[in-house]
Image (cartoon, rainbow, N blue to C red):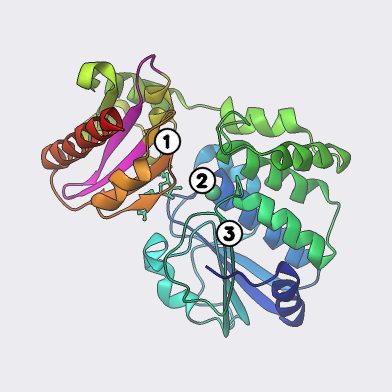
Amino acid sequence: MKNDALSVIAEKIKAAESVWLFPHVNPDGDALGSCAALCRGLRLMGKEAFVLVDEELPANLRFLDNGYCTVDCEKLPEPDICICVDCSSEDRFEKRAQAFYRGRLRICLDHHPARESAWDYNYIDPKEAATGQIIYALLAELGVGPDREIGEAIFAAITTDTGNFQYSNTQAKSHLIAAELYEWGVDCNKVSVAIYENVRLEKMMMQTKAMEGLKLIAGGRGALVSVSREILRETGAFMDEAEGLSKELRSIAGVEYAAVIKEYEREKIKVSLRAKSRGNVARIAEKLGGGGHVKAAGCTIKKPLREAEKLVEREMLAAIRELDEQ
Ligand code: 5GP
Ligand code: MN
């Protein structure tokens, strides 16, 4: 996909008065960190900027929202620009898709592999470890910063999408940006504690209960866990608190593929897929109607939980067989 230069995108933004930012549904630290950083940057430039969201933010990311996020755009005047952040397809912000088209210009900033380009301008680079790194570069083009709050949001974006600088997507650049953020006055420990050491007991209990149902396949190379609505009822946890469970599963010795199968509604099952080293979960997700990265992908299956479990298990087994044939 052909990208527009960030300098060109920066010029368009400079000329705008109002900008709305659209993170993907179930926003993670990269989506929200990127949006918060850009939103604050835009406000420092004197622009009217908002982050439009569908849902309440995960508790450990709420510190990023200093009055930026809103679920209600009806009262806001039409925006000059709408930017989708950390996603490049309307089905990642389905409920807000109409609002997105209220922008006179539409821009996409993302690091997921993208198919179509339905935007007036885009900067999509799957080599970037986090969209936060693209935002860092864009803010430099905009001449904003250094600013501690922006720095914290960018650090949140990078630390979450690189698995705290552990995943294979981590770049030298990720560390270099983090190093620069120290110069901006960012307290990286404070951000890490807020994100990682802030777990609700209900979440811990839900994850423990889900783990009791762990299913290992192909001699322990595939691991699957389901989070049913019943488990949520029993523990008082929220579904977004299943985040991180896929990482736990993958950390089991011998596991190459991990799947967390989440029953949002009776026939709305969201699947989080992870691969450890040689595996490719983007392919599994695509076969099931979703997408994502090689090591982290997902899909939504409109079938009852038990059927979704079978589908995921079947595709995971096929993927393990393919690995063996390579
Ligand atoms: P997670 O497991 O953290 O929800 O998602 C991991 C990655 O998989 C996301 O960054 C996103 O790229 C992708 N992903 C998750 N769910 C979906 C989905 O329903 N559709 C598509 N196309 N991608 C998804
Ligand atoms: Mn991301």
Q: Is mark 1 within 8 Å of ligand 1?
A: yes
Q: Which residue is mark 2?
A: 28
Residue at image location 71% in from the left, 81% down from the top? 16
Taking the spot 36% from the left edge, 32% from the top edge, the residue there is 237
Q: Position of residue 147 (x, y in %)?
A: 83, 51
CA–CA distance between discs 1 and 3?
A: 21 Å
Give the answer, above or below, for where 266 lies relative to 99. Answer: above
Residue 144 visible (yes or no): yes
Residue 238 appearing in the image: no
Q: Who comes first in sequence, dot 3 or dot 2?
A: 2
Badge 2 local density, few (<14 within 10 Å), some, or many (20+)? many
Q: Which residues are magenta?
A: 252-273
Give the dominant element type of the magenta stretch: helix, strand or loop. Answer: strand
Which corner quadrant of the image does residue 173 belong to? top right
Say which of marks 1 and 3 sits in front. Answer: 1
Q: Quadrant of residue 241?
A: top left
Q: Could you tell whether 29 is left or right of 88 in the image? A: right
Is 290 left, or right, of 77 in this rendering? left
Residue at which label 3 appears: 69
Tell us which disc is closer to us: 3 or 2: 2
Rate crowding at label 1 as few (under 14), some (14 to 19) or many (20 or more) other CA atoms within 10 Å.
some
Evaluate if marks 1 and 2 touch, with contact meaning CB atoms under 8 Å apart: yes
Pointer 1 residue: 243
